[in-house]
Amino acid sequence: MANGDERAFEKPRYRSIPGLIASLFLMVGSVIGSQAIGYDKLVEKRVFGMDNYRTQGGEDIPSLKVGWEAYGTLNEAKDNVILITHYFSGTSHAAGRYDEDDAAPGYWDGIIGPGKPLDTDKYYVIASDTLVNLNAKDPKVTTTGPATTNPQTGEPWGLDFPIVTIRDFVEVQKALLKSQGIDSLQAVMGASMGSLQAYEWASAYPEMVERVIPVIGSGVANAYLIGWLNAWAAPIKVDPHWNDGDYYDGEPPTKGLQESLKLITLQANHWKWANHTYDRQWAEEGMDPKSSLEARYLFEKVLDDAAASRAKIADANHLLYLVKANQLFVTGDSSDAEEGLAAIEAPTLVIYSKDDLVFFPELVEKTMDEISADGTSVSQVVLEGDRGHLDGVLSIEQASDDIRQFLAQ
C-alpha cells in the first residue's frame, strides 16, 4: 500500500509530484498528516475464515476469508470493543505500522492510540477487510471475491461470484466478532462506505451497538449517487481486456481500471482544493497544453499517475462488485431507508463536510432527521477544510474532542 505525507499538498513544485500522488486518499488508501503517531505498536495482520457463508441473496460462498487487525487489548468481559469499518478503496489498516520501516501508519492513526479519542489503553479497536476488497493484489489484504479461487472449480470466481451487499459485509464482521466471543460494541465508526456499514450495524443489531459514528455518509444511496457509481464502473466495462470479467488468464483491463480510479479520486476531492493547489500549471515546463493533445496540465498528470500507481494493487472486478454493493445500499437492507434509520436506537454522532461531492450535506442532514425522529439522540460535527469528501479522513482530528466526549457518555 502506498502512503504519503499531507505536507506534499503545499504549493506544488514539479519535483514533488510523487509525494502528491502518494497522498491522494481514495487512490492510495492511506494518508498521514504531520501529527504524532497514534498507535505506537507494530500491527499484526490476521486472517478470519468461514467454511461457508450464505449471502443476503441466498448464495453460498465456501472457504470465505477476510483479513483483520486490532489495536489495544480485549478485556476479560469483552465489552470494550470499537469496530472500525473502512471506505470504498480502503482496507482494515486504520492505525499503526506493520513494520518500523513503513512510510506511514494507517489512515486514522491520528485518533487511534494511547490517549487518543479511540484510546487503546481503554478500548479494543478492531477492523477487517471487506469482502470484494478493491486491493486484492495487496499482500497485506485478505479478501474473498471475484479474483480469488472458487474451491469448487479451482479457477478464479470472476463474475460467477455472488452479488454481495453492505449487509453482507456486516454479517461477516459479526461472525469475526463472534469468533472472539464479542457480543457487544461500544461503538461502530466508519468513513464513506464505512459509514454505510456503521448505519447498517446500528439498524440491524441495535442490541449490540452502544453508539454509532458515521463519517461522511448518508443512510441511502440516492439516485444521483447510483449514477455516479455507474460512471465509476463504466471505463472498466468498455476496456476490451475486461472480456465480461473473464481476464484472469490474460491481460487485465488496466487502462479501464485506471480511468475508473481517476474518476473516483476526482469526485472525492473538491474543486476549491484543486484550484488552489494546482491552478492551471503545466505538467512539464515548456510543454504548453495547447501545443498538442499529449501535453497536459499538472493536475491531469497527478490524477493519471496516481491512478496508474493505485491500479497495481487493485482488481477491476472487485471495483465493480463494490460499486454494486454501494448502489444497493439502503439502511436496514430494505426498500425503505426511513424505516431502517428509525430502527437505530444508539446515540449517533454524525461527522460530515459541507463541501462533500459524494454524500451531499443535505442528504446527510436528512439522515440525521430520520434517525432522531423517534427521539434517538443525534449530534453532529461539521468538518472544516477544502478537500470535500476527503476531509472525513484528512481532517478527522478536528472532531477529536467531540468523539472523546461522545464515547464517554
Image (spheres, grey):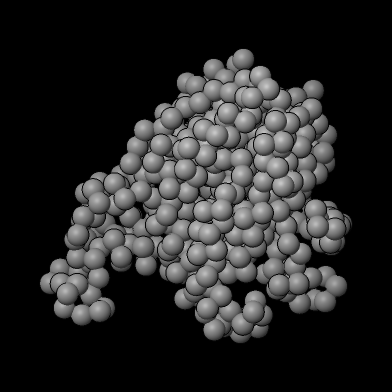
Relative to 123, is 240 on the left or the right?
left
**Residue 127 shows up from this direction:** no
Q: Quadrant of residue 285?
A: bottom left
Relative to 261, is 207 on the left or the right?
right
Residue placed most toward the observer, 143 or 198: 198
Instruction: Tell which residue pokes out farthest to the top in this image.
Output: 409
Give x and y (percent) for residue 275: 25, 51
Instruction: Tell which residue pokes out farthest to the left in this image.
Output: 286
Residue at left offset 71%, top offset 53%:
165
Give x and y (percent) for residue 110: 47, 34
**Residue 363 shows up from this direction:** yes
Residue at left offset 58%, top offset 28%:
369
Relative to 236, is 322 on the left or the right?
right
If the image is split into quadrants, where does the C terminus sit?
top right
Relative to 284, is 341 on the left or the right?
right
Residue at left offset 79%, top offset 70%:
150
Give x and y (percent) for residue 24: 40, 53
Residue at left offset 84%, top offset 61%:
59
Give x and y (percent) for residue 386: 33, 41
Count the marks: how many? 0
